[in-house]
Amino acid sequence: MNIDFAAAGQAPSAETALALLVFEGGALAGPAAQLDTITDGALTRAIAASRFKGSKGQTLELVGPAGSAAGRIVLVGAGSRDTLDERIVEQAAASAYAAVKISGLKTLVVDVSDLAPEQAAHAAFGVRLAAYRFDRYRTKEKPEQKPSVETLRVLAADAAVAQTAFGPLEALADGVSFTRDLVSEPANILYPEEFARRVKALESMGLTVEILGEAEMEKLGMGSLLCVGYGSARESQLAVIQWKGAADPDAQPIAFVGKGVCFDTGGISIKPAEGMEDMKWDMGGAGAVAGLMHTLAGRKAKVNAVGILGLVENMPDGKAVRPGDIVTSMSGQTIEVINTDAEGRLVLADALWYCQDRFKPRFMIDLATLTGAVIIALGNDYAGLFSNDDDLSDQLLAASKATGDNLWRMPLHAGYEKQFDSLAADMKNVGGRPAGSITAALILQKFVNGLPWAHLDIASTAWKKPSSVSTIPEGATGFGVRLLDRLVADNFEG
Ligand code: BES
Ligand code: MN
Ligand code: ZN
């Protein structure tokens, strides 16, 4: 998608669709009112002959009326003018894109010249997010089925200011797309080494990336992470990504850790066939951390940040870890593997311990498609937040509100810990069905060594079908990238 910003009044041509915001209640205003005047009331008539009221999410399309140069007009509802915010602008522009994306027209012009130029930047951001598509393996799609819109022009009160404001948002959209690509790739293409290669390639952005293989992880004593890959023909990897954007390169970093199970069959505790294909996105946590690091580098964030990805594949095999096996983690704590399908916590146990041991970060936040139980608890519109630190939780919840990456804080009550007491080892890797996402979080907490920490269980939000928000197409959502970029920007830069 080519995106540019131009001054108001740039006359669109017959090959363009012109999108205009319409607010609920009251008369047409701004560019919509002007167009209505020069087209002799064509917009007013079209609205009167429809159910369009300017509510959020509504669109009304009309063929370019006499008096307007545009081939089509798209009116987009933006709700009440008083409650307009950046996210509503993004979603309105994304709805306009959705209305015309396969129309055959190549250019979409969004006229938001009556809004602040910073809001115009968000209109462009919304279209960028909505236009994401994973079509790498579709060789037979007919041209008329493919999106036709290639260019977005945003008309802004001050095009230069809008362009500047778009800079960091473009970096964020690039990061979200990077995550969506990783999460969408099938596991025959994206296995641990390939994931690691794609992350290593980010060094061109100024990131430092180290890749540890199985021999190095064995030396470090990562018996917990490594056991997950015993049944896989693919080698397990640990990716260590560093961004040093703070004025002091030695300033204490903040850290993000991702579960990267490139495919989760369940292992010997094998999953049922139905829906197992979904487990290609069991690396969504690692995907989000990779996309976040991409974003921080892309916008040259003034912070030192570390991203750690535990990359494995969980397969049944003669060499696979068995139920009842006892493994020793890098922390020294032993774990009785009761269920080989509870593998994410085994991966994170060593990734978290390694992270705090090597980097002594200000805090650690892990992201993981960890439990089916979080979907039962929260459905698909919220991810679970578990934390030992109220300040970090509050910062995350504020970033969640601002970005629409919804979080709901869940209890981390120690009373649940007895559910994973083991007769033979320091703990079992499962705590039974009750409070399944909480016992999983409590197991992770055993490996954070008392550091401020938050765990985001994104099994509920990493993938969405069907989509319910215009900026998030069906499939990989990129959940977590916007959230954490905002957390960093609002609290940990400068
Ligand atoms: N990757 C799954 C969790 C998951 C389920 C993610 C559905 C996305 C959608 C995880 O490794 C898993 O299998 N968890 C088990 C844990 C259980 C064995 C204690 C689960 O949730 O059933
Ligand atoms: Mn599993
Ligand atoms: Zn899993």
Image (cartoon, rainbow, N blue to C red):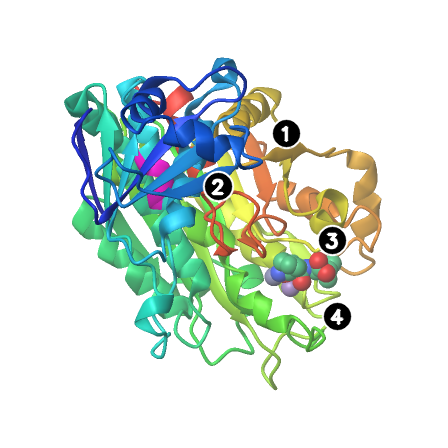
For the point 29% across and 54% down, the residue is 210
User: CA separation, marks 4 and 3?
Assistant: 12 Å
Pick whichever of labels 1 and 3 is earlier in the sequence: 1
User: Disc 1 designates what residue?
Assistant: 388
Magenta range is 124-128
User: CA separation, marks 2 and 4?
Assistant: 34 Å
| Residue 299 in view | yes
Secondary structure beneath label 3: strand
Pick whichever of labels 1 and 4 is earlier in the sequence: 4
User: Disc 4 designates what residue?
Assistant: 324
User: CA separation, marks 1 and 3?
Assistant: 20 Å
User: Quadrant where the C terminus lies?
Assistant: top left
User: CA separation, marks 1 and 4?
Assistant: 30 Å
CB within 8 Å, label 1 to label 2: no
| Residue 360 in view | no
* Front label number (1 vs 4): 1
Amino acid, disc 2: Gly
> Residue 127 magenta-drawn?
yes
* Front label number (1 vs 2): 2
Amino acid, disc 1: Asn
In this image, 156 relative to 344: left or right?
left
